Amino acid sequence: MDHASEVLLQLFVLLLAAKIGDEIFKRLGQPTLIGEILAGVVVGPAVLGWYEINAETSLFAEIGVVLLLFQIGIETRLADLLRVGLAAAAVGFLGVILPLAGGLGLGLAFGFPIEVSVFLAAAMVATSVGITSRVLADVGALGTKSGRIILGAAIIDDILAMIILAIATGMAAGGVSVERIGILMLLAVAFVVIVVVGGRGVLRRRPAILTAPEFARTPFLPGMIIMLGLAALATTIGLAAIIGAFLAGMVVGESSERHALEGEVAPVAAFFTPFFFGAIGAQVDLAGLWDTSALLLLASVTAVAIATKFIGSFVGAMAIGIRRAALVGWGMVPRGEVGIVVAGLGLQLGVIEGSIYSVVVGMAIITTLLVPPAIPWLAGRAESPSSGARTPPEPIAVRARPDPPEPSA
Amino acid sequence: MDHASEVLLQLFVLLLAAKIGDEIFKRLGQPTLIGEILAGVVVGPAVLGWYEINAETSLFAEIGVVLLLFQIGIETRLADLLRVGLAAAAVGFLGVILPLAGGLGLGLAFGFPIEVSVFLAAAMVATSVGITSRVLADVGALGTKSGRIILGAAIIDDILAMIILAIATGMAAGGVSVERIGILMLLAVAFVVIVVVGGRGVLRRRPAILTAPEFARTPFLPGMIIMLGLAALATTIGLAAIIGAFLAGMVVGESSERHALEGEVAPVAAFFTPFFFGAIGAQVDLAGLWDTSALLLLASVTAVAIATKFIGSFVGAMAIGIRRAALVGWGMVPRGEVGIVVAGLGLQLGVIEGSIYSVVVGMAIITTLLVPPAIPWLAGRAESPSSGARTPPEPIAVRARPDPPEPSA
């Protein structure tokens, strides 16, 4: 069997396993993405070894999370995000600074050199906006005030994580250039502002441009092209591809073809996203964790990661009420793709060892599996009339969306 | 920029170029797939060098043609295929034997050793069912008698090509095992019969099984899983992935969720198929053809490939009338993915040289670009009331389907 056939077989195995995991967790009343991640654990190298992370399956995982954020972007209105801008900024900053300090302190306490500790801390800062937004969408809470704050904060948080990563790699390479950090920050802000303001400007003048006669009959391919283009552009200036995809979604979501686009993107996303969740599971390496010191480090890193992110985000969101702040704080806890990417880069640069990489991956998976079960309950409390919020409560589940990545006919 | 970002950028470039090529050829009133192939030539290594064939882009091309055949399969009724079974078998066999003899004779006439000539002949036999069926679908002629004959013949033809390839690789390895050829033929027939009969049996008893409560709410993911599984299974027994995908489509097309499935598969196929057509264009290597003997060989191979396939298929289809036979003969001419794969394998085994590989790719592209423009005219003549067909004429364009891979909202 040649390589292409092997890859087809792996894609088949993962998609089937993810679907089974999804159906099992739906029956258990648990978030289905946990079923998909555990499916990845089972078919991945840790258990059966039928699925591996290689160039092709990595690309599928990447496109999966890119499409997830594109979908979330389509459903997100810029005006809504700006209305919660201050709270989101507070959550984003505090939710980064505390884990950063905690990770640094922990690394030094464990006796790691400073450049290793910085890498460990960098891998601990970024919330997995993919995980959290999928869970919020599942319970219909993406459009609530807490949901919007989490989304805005996670985007800010991702941008900050990229900047911290630039500092960490700079230190690993022998020195941090202040200019490089400044340029990265400037580029990040310019990218976000130009895409959002420019894109909205074009769409305000011609809301149906995506299906203009000289362009296309349906908004689907133009939308996908814009998504891939902005995702690629984001990576060329040092940001994550998902930030570009989210902005692309937000821009095309302002167009009059929004609903047509949502309907057509849904099956494509349903096909790709299981590879994202499955890949997280397939990265589990139990062999790397079979000794006491590694397990101790894992327990400490996980505890610090949960506590610092929750407290930082909770404090940042307190202005909107204790119950909502609890939802925001808990919703920011999952780490995922960004932390794993950062740790992988550290491994590649020779800064951190394989055992620390395994610990970071383990922390990302534990936080990701721990958070979703409590979200529906926290969301119900946060948005109930007695939530003690200082602003009027908003209804949950504006749209019926029981299972977003699987389109209904 | 890391490798994953580079790949994202390449996907963006190809999708954008293919969309532009598609729109230009739509305005010219020409088959849009030519625009997509030429877009691949322009952004590929031959001109701009912005797109390359690597592991990831190859997989996208493979999934593109797999989805194309899956879509065609969904629209194909087994009963319709069986009704044209004899004619399709005649077209398939004669359309393989003549190019095989022609390719062998040509190779020997050019002074190549027998094992090289066999490889050249093997690369000349297989019609690109992907190309032809897409063009037929574009002009709404897939459901006509000629369209069904072409489809059935192209499938038979692909199976025969696989068997000839097994003989060619056996000869290259020092001897052909009759047992291996026999086993391959038996497996191929068993695979087709078991999938079709078994799948139809299950669906007859439970036509809505794909959306059974214990399974899924929409037929989309179950359908995609069946497609990937049968495509992978086909490759493990030595058949092309597209044969498995076509059979998968034909089976799920018998279910009651056929239309829901079509609507959900369309955007996924619209996203992937440009990578298939673009990859054909990106394989053009002008450098390999810059000398007189290579150009002479290319001209001879192309002429023999066109003449033998047209005459063989035309004679095989004469029972349904001259005009329809002309459509069938011409529709079988395009070579594509299978020929290129066969030549690539020969190159890999060290049997054929780079210059012969370039000639085969050049022949595949020339036949592919030459055929589509005449198809609408031939289809109009073949199915007009005065076509002289011995069977009653059937209407063209049963369904409105102006641009199949791009779903309408």
Image (cartoon, coloured by chain):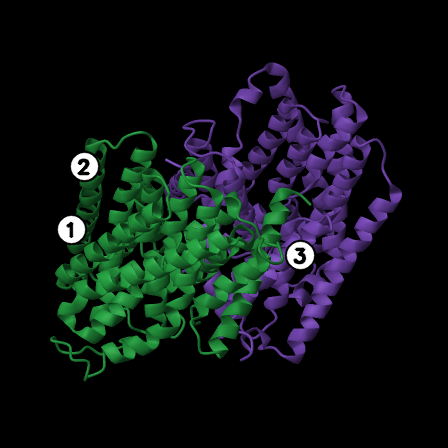
Chain colours: A purple, B green
Q: Distance of mark 2 from mark 3, alpha carbons? A: 76 Å
Q: Are marks 2 and 3 in contact (CB under 8 Å)?
A: no
Label 3: chain?
A
Secondary element at image label 3: loop
Kind of residue at disc 1: Gly
On residue A389, the disc is 3
Q: Disc 3 and disc 1: Cα gap in Å?
A: 59 Å
Secondary structure beneath dot 2 equals: helix
Disc on res. A140: none
Disc 1 element: helix
Q: Which residue is mark 2?
A: B182
Q: Quadrant location of the N terminus of chain B?
A: top right
Mark 2 surroundings: few (<14), some (14-19) or many (≥20) residues within 10 A: few
Q: Position of residue B338 (x, y in %)?
A: 36, 50
Regarding residue A359, the answer to whether it shows in the image is yes
- Mark 1 belongs to which subunit? B
Q: Which residue carries the number 1 mark?
A: B201
Residue A257: x and y in percent read: 53, 73
Q: Which comes before the other along the chain, label 2 or label 1?
A: 2
Name the amino acid type tagged 3. Answer: Ala
Whether marks 2 and 1 lie on the same chain: yes
Q: Are marks 2 and 3 on the same chain?
A: no
Kindly check if marks 2 and 1 are in contact, taking CB atoms under 8 A apart as contact: no
Q: Nearer the viewer, mark 2 or mark 3?
A: 2
Q: Amino acid at mark 2?
A: Gly
Tell me which residue sits at (56%, 33%) in the image: A366
Q: Residue placed farthest to the right in the image?
A: A178
Separation of marks 2 and 1 at Cα, in angstroms: 28 Å
Chain letter of mark 2 equals B
User: On the rendered structure, is B318 left or right of A228?
Assistant: left
Q: Nearer the viewer, residue A227 or B397?
A: B397
